[in-house]
Image: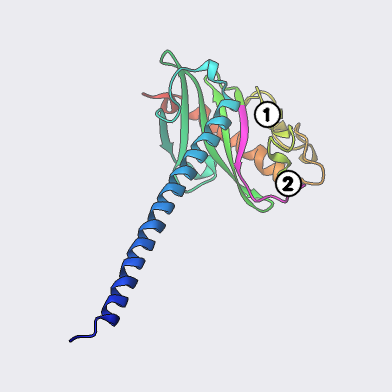
């Protein structure tokens, strides 16, 4: 008579392993799905802060393109542009630009530009700036980022698209200059890209 004890024990371990692995996969899948939903919801809120939903009637997540311009958009990788339209007519393009020279690294931005070339608004989507100092670029921490609303390449003039410390028009954050300097440049560069590629950005 064979000893089935070790065999049954091994089989039990295999079953436990399979069940545990399945549970881990299920939990990971549910967690990953929820994270994706949360990220999409957060992104939509930010987009709607830049361009109010009453101004467009299309689905921003369905009307996107990828573009690439290292010099003006701050990244070697393709970046996403969300296009807002109303009854098919262009309303605004929201570019995911990068300010590569923040104090603590790259600062990722959403730069909304209305079809007439004026800024709809700007929001910071990701950064690693110092808490209590450089993080004042977040709309939740201060309203500094709103100083760019309705500005354009002509307002201020090119010579004034700098922080005040560099002879420009924009205030720096108290105790921080490098961070706002990087953001001002990135926004101005995004406007330059928009001006040069307006037809491409709104092409069907």
Residue occupying the far top of the picture: 87
Residue occupying the far left of the picture: 1
The answer to whether any part of residue 166 appears in the image is: yes
Which of the marked residues, 2 or 1, is nearer the chain's N terminus? 2
In the image, 36 versus 52, the foreground residue is 36
The answer to whether any part of residue 191 appears in the image is: no
Q: From the viewer's perspective, is residue 179 above or below residue 149?
A: below
Residue at position x 40%, y 50% in the image:
29
Residue span colored magenta: 121-133
Query: In which quadrant of the rendered view does residue 118 lie?
Result: top right
Q: Position of residue 158 (x, y in %)?
A: 67, 30
Q: From the viewer's perspective, is residue 113 above or below residue 2?
A: above
Query: In which quadrant of the rendered view does residue 51 lie?
Result: top right
Dot 1: few (<14), some (14–19), or many (≥20) neighbours within 10 Å?
some
| Residue 157: in magenta span | no
| Residue 128: in magenta span | yes
- Return the residue at label 2: 134
- Return the residue at label 1: 148
| Foreground tag (2 vs 1) | 2
Q: Position of residue 168 (x, y in %)?
A: 75, 34
In the image, 7 versus 60, the foreground residue is 7
């Amino acid at each position: 008579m064979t000893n089935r004890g070790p065999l049954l024990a091994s089989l039990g371990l295999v079953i436990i392993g399979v069940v545990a692995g399945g549970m881990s996969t299920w939990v990971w899948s549910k967690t990953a799905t929820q994270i994706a939903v949360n990220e999409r919801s957060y992104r939509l809120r930010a987009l709607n802060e830049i361009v109010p939903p009453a101004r467009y009637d299309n689905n921003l997540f369905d009307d996107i393109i990828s573009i690439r311009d290292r010099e003006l958009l701050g990244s070697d990788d393709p970046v996403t542009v969300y296009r807002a339209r109303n009854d098919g007519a262009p309303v605004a393009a929201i570019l995911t630009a990068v300010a590569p020279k923040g104090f603590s690294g790259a600062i990722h931005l959403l730069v909304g530009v209305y079809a007439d070339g004026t800024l709809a608004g700007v929001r910071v989507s990701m950064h690693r700036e110092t808490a209590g100092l450089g993080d004042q670029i977040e709309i939740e921490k201060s309203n500094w980022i709103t100083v760019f609303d309705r500005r354009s390449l002509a307002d201020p003039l090119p010579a004034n698209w700098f922080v005040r410390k560099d002879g420009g028009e924009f205030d720096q954050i108290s105790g921080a200059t490098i961070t706002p300097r990087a953001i001002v440049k990135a926004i101005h560069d995004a406007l330059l890209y928009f001006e040069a590629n307006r037809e491409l950005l709104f092409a069907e």
